[in-house]
Amino acid sequence: MSSAAQPNFTPDFAVTFTNLLIGRLEKETPATRKVIANVPNDKRDYKPEPNSRSAWELAVHLAQSDVWFLNSIADQQFAWTGDPPTPASDVKGLVEWYDAEYPKALARVKAMKPEQLTQPVDFFGIMNEPVFLYLQFVQDHKVHHRGQLSTYLRPMGAKVPDIYGGSFDEPFKGQ
């Protein structure tokens, strides 16, 4: 565990930051859902290169890690016991699982008290930060892997959804 001095964040700051990041996560989730849902089930084994994860592996990782990170923040503990069982056998089932589990995990974080948010939590000996700061890691991780998966879509013959302002397949509608 890191012995670095902890920044002195006030509970008010932690709540404000948490609300800001939760708002970002809520805005990002529909795009993440669309990217996962656009993976063609019959081409989910696609890899752009032999050392890459398959589209299915990326989709499962993206969905499961979003939920795992949020639940770990709410639990104030990052525990890894190995890869969990895949929550579905196909893309439709994975989207349904994500639609059910992600809001529950996010609600758990929303319900955290200010004192809980400022509690330092160890992240596998790499970081030991006030738990609310890990929400930025959730956001960054989501965007990183969604970006990877979105680049797989067109080579698989799928449509690339509007993520940040439209795509060839889903033009920006000004919403």
Image (tube, rainbow, N blue to C red):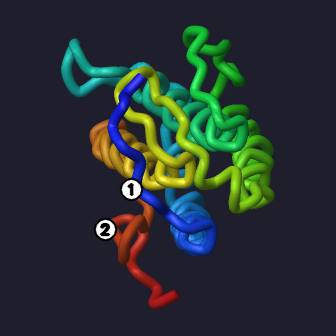
Q: Earlier in the sequence, mark 2 or mark 1?
A: 1
In this rendering, does residue 61 appear at all? Answer: yes
Q: Residue 56: where, in percent of width, then height?
A: 48, 25
Pick the front one: 125 or 171: 125
User: Does residue 95 appear left or right of residue 144 in this picture?
Assistant: right
Q: Is residue 171 above or below residue 93?
A: below
The residue under the point 52% across, 87% down is: 175
Q: Secondary structure at mark 1?
A: loop
Displayed quadrant of residue 67: top right
Q: Position of residue 85 (x, y in %)?
A: 67, 13
Q: In the displayed structure, would residue 110 be above or below residue 105?
A: below
In the image: residue 19, left or right of residue 130: right
Residue sticking out furthest to the top? 82
Relative horizontal placement of residue 74, taking residue 39 as reference (left or right): right
Amino acid marked by disc 1: Val
> Which residue does the numbered mark 1 point to in the structure image?
160
Residue drawn at the location 36% of the way across and 77% of the way down: 165
Within the image, what quadrant is residue 23 found in? Answer: bottom right
Q: Decide: few, some or many residues near mark 2? Use Cα within 10 Å; few <14, some 14-19, many ≥20.
A: few
Spatial CA distance of label 2 from label 1 is: 7 Å
For the point 33% across and 37% down, the residue is 4
Quadrant in the picture for residue 29 = bottom right
Label 2 residue SS: loop
Q: Residue drawn at (80%, 58%), measured in percent from left and top?
A: 111
Q: Which quarter of the rendered picture does the N terminus lie within? A: top left
Per the image, the residue denoted by label 2 is 168
* Vertical arrangement, residue 111 with respect to residue 85, above or below: below
Q: Residue furthest bottom?
A: 174
Q: Nearer the viewer, residue 67 or 119?
A: 119
Q: Residues within 10 Å of mark 1 (few under 14, many from 20)?
A: many
Marks 2/1 in contact by CB < 8 Å: the verdict is: yes
